[in-house]
Amino acid sequence: MLDTARIRQDFPVLRKTDCGELGIYFDNAATTYKPQTVIDAVMAYYTEGSVNIHRGEYDRSFAISEAYDAARAKVARFIHADPHEIIFTSGATASMNLIAMGYAEAVLQPDDVILTLESEHASSLLPLMRVASKTGARIEYIPLLDGGRFDLEAYKNALHDRVKLVAVAHVSNVLGYILPIAEMARLAHSVGAVICVDGAQSVPHLKTDVTGWDIDFLSFSSHKMLGPTGLGILYGKKALLDQMDPVLLGGGSNARFDRTGQLVLKGTPYKFESGTPAIEAVLGLSAAIDYLEGLGMDAIYEAEHALKARMVQGLSTLDHIVLYNADAPTGIVTFNVKGIPAQDVAFYLNANGIMVRSGNHCAKVLVDVIHTPDTVRASLAFYNTPAEVDRLIDVLRSVTLEACIAVTIA
């Protein structure tokens, strides 16, 4: 069991919260707070390193390069991959666009099928829609059960020999349901399809094993797992990465070129990493992984699930609350207040010191499944407390439209 009181002391922003300076943060699905060790790693680069990598013929560059390479190896170990299968990008969005432009555009043919879900994030759906438009492929959707729950039988029935790419989020950023990725990968491969997984909401909270699950691609973000912003990770099976062309070209990705345009690229993963990377972010991510592993991914999941159960139990007692994912096993709680727009509820909660997210959460197609354009999302992290959960429930207990309007126009 995690010692939350001690853990909160590791986060400077939470130490401020304890002093009453900041409010309760329930927007962890958007980005997480950073522990001091991550901040220290970033600051150490700027104050003690602050040099480029793989360029300079001097000791400090060698040392920073070694730390950077060690971080890539650590990321690989964290998800059970090989370091040569780890590409650093500017974010999960960039990773998914790289899959779309570097892989899907090159292999898809007219009438090939991309199979996905209506609950997917825009960072996945929009690149896929562009790929379909360029290649003549088409997108088909796996039917979801009422409320947006995944149905394995529906997935099996949706697979056929024209499906060449399956693209799904391991955990939905709106509803928090966990997909059976290993079984989905097995079934996708049985029809000759490649599976691409959005792990932005799963890697920070669940043990990840890309080799054991036999998935082909995985995208995730540093900033959602305690690390710095501006850094994403793309895992890909090396055989697939080797056959892909990079989307960007420049320094760092080429072995040589001449004035006639003869170009020789470096091998995977370096051919995908043109330009100066976010060195400080990579070193910060390394520290974030150390922190997560120090707590234990199983312990993190159990703590967040317990908080989610407490929140759901409390909100379920309020007749004016509509819960959309009470049975989801992750720390995402999605709800509305009857008769009050989601944004007004979020403003009201903010006025009471509680930070949540409102809107469609970049999953605009999901409206056709859950039959509402906007929801309020409270997303939990292991550093949240039962008292914070209880405070949210207490504030929502007495929320009224009039009170929300008064806050909105104030």
Image (cartoon, rainbow, N blue to C red):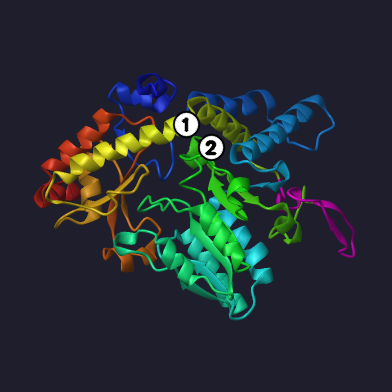
Residue depicted at 89% across the width and 61% down the height: 259
Residue nearest the observer in this picture, 254 or 226 = 226
Task: Describe residue 263's horizontal placement relative to residue 301 as left or right.
Answer: right
Task: Give above or below for 19 relative to 222.
Answer: above
Residue depicted at 26% across the width and 31% down the height: 388
- Figure quadrant of residue 195: bottom right
Label ID, residue 228 = 2
Task: Decide: few, some or many residues near mark 1? Use Cα within 10 Å; few <14, some 14-19, many ≥20.
Answer: many
Q: Is residue 233 visible?
A: no
Residue depicted at 29% across the width and 60% down the height: 147
Residue holding disc 1: 34
* Amino acid on which the number 1 mark rests in the picture: Lys
Image x and y of residue 356, in percent: 30, 44
* Amino acid on which the number 2 mark rests in the picture: Pro
Residue 255 lies within the magenta run: yes
Q: Secondary structure at mark 1?
A: loop
Residue 196 lies within the magenta run: no
Q: Over which residues does the magenta segment extend? A: 254-275
